[in-house]
Image (cartoon, rainbow, N blue to C red):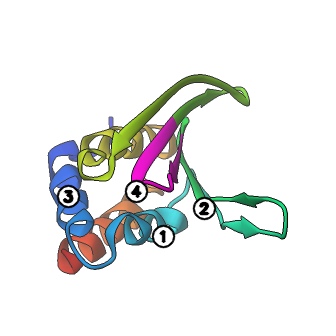
Amino acid sequence: MSDFDIDTATRAINAALGGPGGPGLVFNVFAGVPGVTRTPPRKSLFRSEPERVQIGSWRYELTRDDRIKADHIVGGIVLAEEVLPAAGIAPHLARALAEVATSYGAPALPHLSAALEVLAEAG
């Protein structure tokens, strides 16, 4: 079992979501954590794709109306899709980060702690 505290993570994420960086800051801070993959936004003349962050088995992206789309992905297949208000995403992200902490164990914990510290100070 890991030493990752979901309640502490939820508070830090909530603080950052209410701050000047908003969801973009939250997604960027976790990009350096093992088990997290960030795909930058792609824009072209005929098509664009928003920034995406995959944390464990969940992929998140900011919608045009400032909500967060969360897809549960297993084996490359989307099993579930939720659209949540940005302000309510903190518990969801904290659970996904707990999944990463459990999967990657001790090597991921310092990265997660550092990211949560940055978010707590930003909020």
Tell me which numbered mark, 2 or 4, is placed earlier along the sequence. Answer: 2
- Residue at disc 1, secondary structure: helix
Distance of mark 3 from mark 2, alpha carbons?
A: 20 Å
Identify the residue position indicated by label 4 in the image.
Answer: 66
Query: Badge 4, how many Cα within 10 Å: few under 14, some, many 20+?
Result: few
N-term-proximal mark, 3 vs 2: 3
Residue 14, label in figure: 3
- Amino acid on which the number 4 mark rests in the picture: Asp
Pointer 1 local density, CA inside 10 Å: few below 14, some 14–19, many at least 20: some
| Residue 43 at x, y percent in the picture | 75, 69
Quarter of the image with the C terminus is bottom left
Q: Amino acid at mark 1?
A: Asn
Check residue 28 in the rendering and tell me which mark sits there, or answer none: 1
Could you tell me which residue is drawn at 15 percent across and 56 percent down? 11
User: Which of pointers 4 and 3 indicates the residue nearer the eye?
Assistant: 4
Distance (Cα) linking label 1 and label 3:
15 Å
Placement of 122 over or under 7, stated as above or below: below
